[in-house]
Image: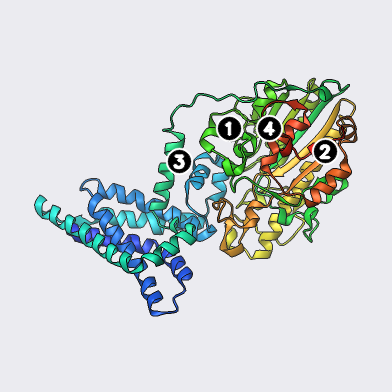
Amino acid sequence: MAHIQKLQCNDTGFNLCCALFFTVINALFIHRSWQIITPHSLHAWLFAASVPVVLFCAWLTIFSAINIPWLRKPMLSLLLLGCAASNYFMYTYGAVIDQNMMVNVFETNSQEAAALITPQMLMWLSLAGLIPALILATIKIKPARWWRLFLNRLAGILVGLLVIFLLAAVFYQDYASLFRNNKGVVKMVTPANYISAISRYSKDHWFAGDRTLIRIGEDARKGPVISQQKKKTLVVLIVGEASRAENYSLGGYTRETNPEMKKHSVIYFPHASSCGTETAVSVPCMFSGMPRKQYDADLARHQEGLLDVMAHAGINLLWRDNDGGCKGACSRIPHTDMTQWKLSSLCNKSCIDDAVLYRLDNVLNGVQRDSVIVLHLMGSHGPAYYQRYPDKFRHFTPTCDSNQIQDCDRQSLINTYDNTILYTDDVVSRTIDMLKTHADKFNTALVYLSDHGESLGESGIYLHGTPYMLAPSQQTHIPFLFWLSKDYQQNYAIDSGCLKQKAASSAVSQDNIFSTLLGMMDIKSSVYQPHMDILAGCRNA
């Protein structure tokens, strides 16, 4: 420690060291750039060699400008810790650090966050963040006259910019092509990636303008079909978590992961896609009524959605959650967080999805009106897949009983993930069984879909949250199915044969949820779009 305490340098040397260190921190960005460039000629080799030089000069320019005495050490310490965390998730899970990732960070709950904390992560943060920050704090920077300091800083800025401009003049087309065709690579530059993401998140969530609630669908009313029913109508919408269609036997997966739902003759749509690759985007998007390509997250946060329109029509509503909240979709209707019920038999570090079924039968016994109930599952949320199902569903073995999934062999990881799908299959099946027991009181129906998919190591990517335009199909291809009781089919004139044919050939998405649910409850409103209602073409006149 005595050695470390004697470390000292002048201001210019300190800025040069900072620039060098933050260039080394971005080894992943440099490596990925070189992979894309794949140099095969002298020009390409020189271009590849220029990448770390440009990065170094950019950091030198930045640190020469912002390394203000008294503030530089605390600021750099925070940046180092942030870079360590950012690099950990990029190296370990192939994550892309952008605004949507910041939404996940700020809006995740404690049980989801705890699953990400591993000994490996703590060691990484210590070695790459905490220890360098402590060393930085011990460096003594020699004082200098203000004019010498100013001139040296100015020289650093000018030299850095000059080298960047010279290299840009020679390799402009190469850099333009690299960044235009590989947009994700820019988001690997840290701390620029997470600083940009946090600033955008802050602007959208904490410093936005007018937040007056915009009402939609206030003209909503029940149509003649539901109004004339002898029995009340009950639809259960189950929103899964991180279930990818690729692992559903209902869609052709070779393993039997959906044995229970098959017994109920559900109608499965094999060509379904999500609105986003993370819960914080997909859930508010599907309930907003805005299609994915026109989805405005800021508008969705202060505009009514599907459940509000149903409430305007007099539908009884309830949201039961086991997955970190509804992201604003249920803010103005009755909702309950099942993790707060402290169900000791179902909850340890997190709650298994039996929690959403807890006393649900009692709820159904008390329902007296046409109703929609949303069940939000924890489903297959990673990385602690092994905690998402009871022991009796440990059917596929060996399993990856760790949240350090990158250290598990691929087959055990897939086994563990498939067990989560098997358990979700059972939860959905038991919900259908519960609805069947209330057939004398309700016309019943159920819709199940996942919020997004999941990556299990394909191309070095794990979990989810990759920007949509870069996301692999495993993160956007989702399971989507209907179960319609015989009474519902008869009383709402649904041709199941027509629906099965449509399912086999039609591409659907979360964009369809808004109008499909309104149609299932026969709600008439100007916001209902018949062409987006999946069942519309299969209703007999």
View extreme (bottom): residue: 41
Left or right: where does residue 110 sit relative to residue 354?
A: left
Lower position in the chain sequence, tag 3 or tag 4 = 3
Vertically, is 462 above or below 169?
A: above
Q: Which residue is mark 1?
A: 328
Q: Which residue is mark 4?
A: 320
Q: Which of label 2 and label 1 is nearer to you?
A: 1
Vertically, is 55 above or below 199?
A: below
Q: Within 10 angstroms of label 1, few (less than 14), some, or many (20 or more) residues?
A: some
Q: How far apart are the alpha carbons under marks 3 and 2?
A: 39 Å
Left or right: where does residue 486 sit relative to residue 165?
A: right
Q: Within 10 angstroms of label 2, few (less than 14), some, or many (20 or more) residues?
A: many
Q: Which residue is mark 2?
A: 432
Left or right: where does residue 413 sit relative to residue 75?
A: right
The way the protein has been coloured in the rendering is: rainbow
- Measured as percent of width and height from the top left, residue 498 is found at 86, 44
Residue 201, which numbered label?
3
Task: State the quadrant of the N terminus.
Answer: bottom left
Question: Could you tell me the amino acid type at mark 3?
Answer: Tyr
Task: State the quadrant of the C terminus.
Answer: top right
Q: Residue at x 43, y 42 (%)?
A: 200
Question: Could you tell me the amino acid type at mark 4?
Answer: Arg
Query: Which of the 4 image quadrants contains residue 199?
Result: top left
